[in-house]
Image: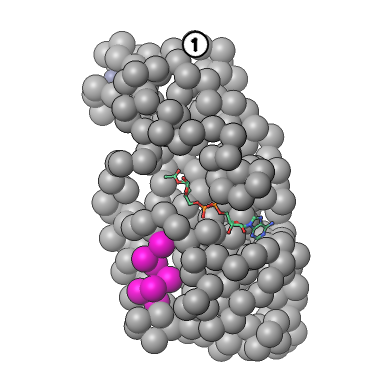
Amino acid sequence: MMAEAAKLLARSKFAIAFTGAGISAESGVPTFRGKDGLWMRYRPEELATPEAFSRNPRLVWDFYKWRMKLIAKARPNRAHYALAKLEEMGILKAVITQNVDDLHREAGTKNLIELHGNIFRVRCTSCDYRENLKESCSLEEFLREELPKCPNCGSLLRPDVVWFGEPLPEEELSEAFKLARRADLILVIGTSGLVYPAAYIPYIVKENGGIVIEINVEESALTPIADIFLRGKAGEVMGTLLEEVKKILD
Ligand code: OAD
Ligand code: ZN
């Protein structure tokens, strides 16, 4: 299985990756579903919807600040680095992620499409104000504010992430679909494949004749369309896969 996957990847002309929370699990970032998942402990409709935010912005901000702190301490793992390396080698053309944790960028991935936003970005609920707290180095200061307000207009700021019931960012989604139509291979890593429209991406690749290689610790909703299923932790499997690809190309 691993050898076959490495051969297909090494021979591919336009490979892309589609990632979910499972790729960051080994970095200590909790996933959403499954036994230790966030949505087992918290109700998403109370924390990750526009209605929840207008009802109780403090509760929602407390949840996001907790995640910001946790994620700020997390470092990319071997899976993130393997994808960055595969891009550098010219094999991988893009990473499309559902994650908001910034770990792909930190690992060095250049062509990154963030479908669900980024936890270090905030935006105003009234005006066009946006800020990347990592780039402006103001995360610590920000975390001390109880209810963050817009420096331009004084309205409430919100996390620049996609909540349930909200549309995905248009440009990112259309770019992701475009890449999926073009791809001859997709690595589907650490996602339950239950959240749409993101989960269409592997189907688009498949429908256009591309190969689907899935990496997950267990079967997912996308496993039925996977040509190859590599069972295991993303960091371990991707580390091995990268080594195998290098051997083929050496
Ligand atoms: P989920 O929590 O739904 O799924 C995580 C997947 O990762 C599961 O299939 C696990 O089996 C797998 N997994 C766990 N640990 C792993 C490891 N070490 N290596 C490989 N796989 C592992 O997360 P997502 O599919 O990303 O949406 O969830 C999709 C969306 O639902 C998220 O983007 C978020 C959430 O609500 C928004 O925030 C809009
Ligand atoms: Zn504003």
x and y percentages locating residue 25 in the rendered image: 67, 50
Q: Residue at x 30, y 41 (%)?
A: 166
Residue 102: image location, x then y, percent: 55, 45
Q: In the rendered view, tell whether residue 46 sits above or below residue 221.
A: above
Which residue is label 1 attached to? Answer: 146
In the image, residue 186 sits, relative to residue 25, either above or below, namely below
Q: Position of residue 104 (x, y in %)?
A: 57, 53
Residue 58 magenta-drawn? no
Which of the 4 quarters of the picture holds residue 230? Answer: bottom right
- Amino acid type indicated by mark 1: Glu
The answer to if 204 sits in the magenta stretch is yes
Q: Nearer the viewer, residue 214 or 11?
A: 214
Answer whether residue 218 is visible to the viewer in this image: yes
Which residue does the image show at 30% across and 14% down from the upper left?
155
Q: Secondary structure at mark 1?
A: loop
- Which residues make up the magenta segment? 199-205
Where's the N terminus, which quadrant? bottom right
